[in-house]
Amino acid sequence: MDNRTLIMSTSRIAALVLIVVGGILLYFGYTASESALESFTETVTGRFTDQTTMYIVGGAACAVVGVGLLLFGKK
């Protein structure tokens, strides 16, 4: 048997980790956006706080990079 069939490639593991981290960050961003303080801040300023925005943007970026690496990465 070849070792490549037994062990998942490093790029595939990194892709899966990025997808999971992205999902976690998106979850935190979503729950933060639903909080009472965040709703008040959004009502007053018309936008989310910087921390909530970073959770959402960072989570989306991690997930997109993870999916891209999974689809187009070295096999």
Image (tube, rainbow, N blue to C red):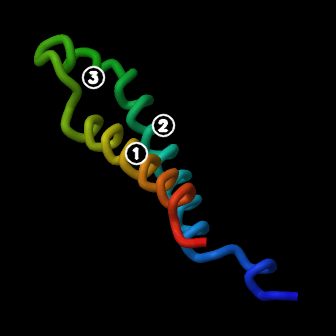
Mark 3, residue position: 37
Taking the spot 60% from the left edge, 68% from the top edge, the residue there is 13
- Spatial distance from mark 3 to mark 2, Cα to Cα? 17 Å
Disc on res. 69:
none
Disc on res. 27:
2
Q: Are marks 2 and 1 in contact (CB under 8 Å)?
A: yes
- Which amino acid lies under the numbered mark 3 shown in the image of this protein? Leu
**Where does the image place residue 41, in percent across and percent down from the top left?**
19, 20
Taking the spot 44% from the left edge, 39% from the top edge, the residue there is 26
**Of marks 2 and 1, the one in the foreground:** 1
- Which comes sooner in the sequence, label 1 or label 3? 3
Mark 1, residue position: 59
- Which comes sooner in the sequence, label 3 or label 2? 2
**Where does the image place residue 15, in percent across and percent down from the top left?**
53, 61
- Which amino acid lies under the numbered mark 2 shown in the image of this protein? Tyr
Closer to the camera in the image, 22 or 69: 69
Label 3 environment density (alpha carbons within 10 Å; few <14, some 14–19, many ≥20) = few
Snapshot quadrant of residue 28: top left
